[in-house]
Image (cartoon, helix red, strand yellow):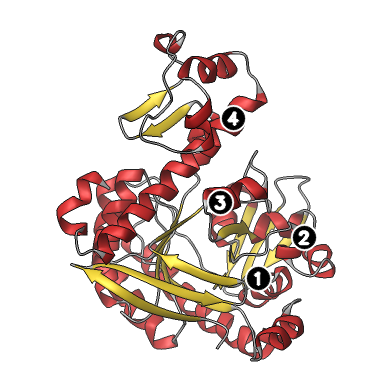
Amino acid sequence: MSFSFQVEATCGAARAGEFVTPHGVVKTPIFMPVGTLASVKGVPQEILEELGVQILLNNTYHLYLRPGVETVRKMGGVQKFMSWDKPILTDSGGFQVFSLSELRKLNEDGVEFRSHIDGSSHFFSPENSIAHEIGLGADIIMAFDECVEYPADYKRAQDSMEMTLRWAQRSKNYWESHKTEVPWYEEKTRELGSEQTQALFGIVQGGMYPDLRRESAQRTVEIDFPGYAIGGLSVGEPREKTWDMVQETIPLLPTDKPRYVMGVGTPEEIVQYVSLGVDMMDCVLPTRAARHGLLFTSEGKVNIKNARYVQDDGPLDPKCGCRVCRRYSRAYLRHLYASHEVLAQVLNTVHNLAYYLDTMKRAREAIILGEFASSRSAV
């Protein structure tokens, strides 16, 4: 088997498990840093390894536009291209195409859109989106879906859900016929002694309507994927709505397969999602916030731009053991940011990623010890 998942321990609804991919094992619950352009902004791969990153997320839309799927394929796949010999997940590009609402036309066949780089015209369908993901060669790939805007009326959300379900079946059909075309297929198959292919996850949609979310979950599970994601969140809805949609959906997803909530959230929120039984999450927040001087610590959020830190010689977070907190003071980090030094963004990003990863590590340990429910506030 090229992909497998097992739950190792539970504490309430929270789960600690692991999934096996052709490029290694991932312990869950897991937070996946976002490396949109085959790069986590400002952080070299050796530091990601030092931080304990197990799996990265890359973006199909952006890599399709630049440097191009064929370039990555000829380099042996995205792992070899970016010198990262660990698991990678690629999204389908559906969310990015959704965000180009002024530059796209959508119909049953797929989506025509214009590049945000040069305005050139392109087309994504379930079939060629999966072809691009196969060419990039990530271990986990996502079915092509439509992400509905917020707010959307019931009919709009229902029509979008129905199309996503049809596209999910088309994505699976194409993948089943072409799954051995992954750049590393023959090499990994020989190395590991069995057929090694990617895992294709389905995506639950339905807008902010509980009944549509439930229907989408049930019908996506019927198509049968090795993992399931909850998409269409963090599109402008109140956080309470996000929570409600996840809560409605999770009980309907199989307990023996990984559950992935896309595009969430703050450190406090990701712990809450773990409590519902979510296994995988990603979000641009730790890296984006870092670039704007917002840092997450055990003592709360720190806006390093504030003048109060000008002569603060203490570490950013006294309870954090990352390379930033071990070496640099808040005063120095504040100076770098105020001086517009590129190093400020690098160090801020390293710390925020460390904080997110450590949060997931503590959550996993608490689940295994059976202490998660009683210690959530301390995770």
**Mark 1 or 3, closer to the camera:** 3
Q: Earlier in the sequence, mark 2 or mark 3?
A: 3
Q: Is residue 227 left or right of residue 100?
A: left
In the picture of the structure, the residue carrying the numbered disc 4 is: 345
Q: Is there CB contact under 8 Å for labels 1 and 4?
A: no
What amino acid does circle 1 point to?
Ser
In the picture of the structure, the residue carrying the numbered disc 3 is: 34
In the picture of the structure, the residue carrying the numbered disc 1 is: 129
**Mark 1 or 4, closer to the camera:** 4
Q: Is residue 95 above or below residue 171?
A: above
Residue at 69 percent of width and 87 percent of height: 189
Residue at 37 percent of width and 69 percent of height: 158
What amino acid does circle 3 point to?
Val
The quarter holding residue 306 reads: top left
In the picture of the structure, the residue carrying the numbered disc 2 is: 81
* Residue 226 disc label: none
Q: Is residue 337 above or below residue 33?
A: above
